[in-house]
Amino acid sequence: MLEPDIICELWAPAIYNSWLAMAQAIAITRRSRGNQHFANFEYLAYVAQQWLEGNPDVYPRGVPRLAAPDPWLAEDRKRAT
């Protein structure tokens, strides 16, 4: 019912990171409720993971990036040395 590329383009990082954040709780829940518990979420996270691996940078090629001001860069570099 949903187009995976559209869903992943918009939400793959959030989906996959949510799975990672909940994985231990899901494992505990599955002890008593079985592997089918959260199965749809697991599959969605799998699809998101696969999409992320194949699309590491979704920013279009050839399009210039906007400058992101980093007022803390100099301070961070001083602390790193």
Image (cartoon, grey):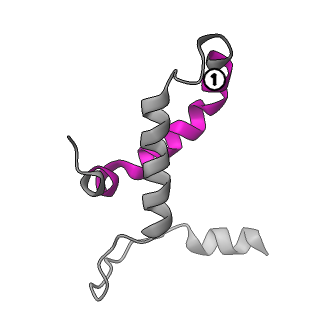
Q: Residue at x 34, y 53 (%)?
A: 8
In this rendering, the answer to whether 18 lies above or below 51 is above
Of residues 66 and 11, the one drawn nearer to the viewer in this rendering: 11
Q: Which residue is mark 1?
A: 25
- Quarter of the figure that contains the C terminus: bottom right
- Quarter of the figure that contains the N terminus: top left
In this rendering, the answer to whether 30 lies above or below 75 is above
Label 1 SS: helix
Looking at the image, the residue that sits furthest to the right is 81
| Residue 48 percent across, percent down from the top left | 43, 51
Q: Amino acid type of disc 1?
A: Ala
Answer whether residue 46 is magenta in the image: no
Q: Is residue 64 left or right of residue 14?
A: left
Where on the picture, by quarter, is residue 59?
bottom left
| Residue 24 percent across, percent down from the top left | 67, 29
Q: Which residues are magenta?
A: 7-29
In this rendering, the answer to whether 3 lies above or below 68 is above
Of residues 78 and 36, the one drawn nearer to the viewer in this rendering: 36
Q: Residue at x 22, y 44 (%)?
A: 2
Looking at the image, the residue that sits furthest to the bottom is 62
Q: Is residue 74 left or right of residue 11?
A: right
Of residues 15 and 77, the one drawn nearer to the viewer in this rendering: 15
Q: Main secondary structure of the magenta part?
A: helix
| Residue 66 percent across, percent down from the top left | 31, 77
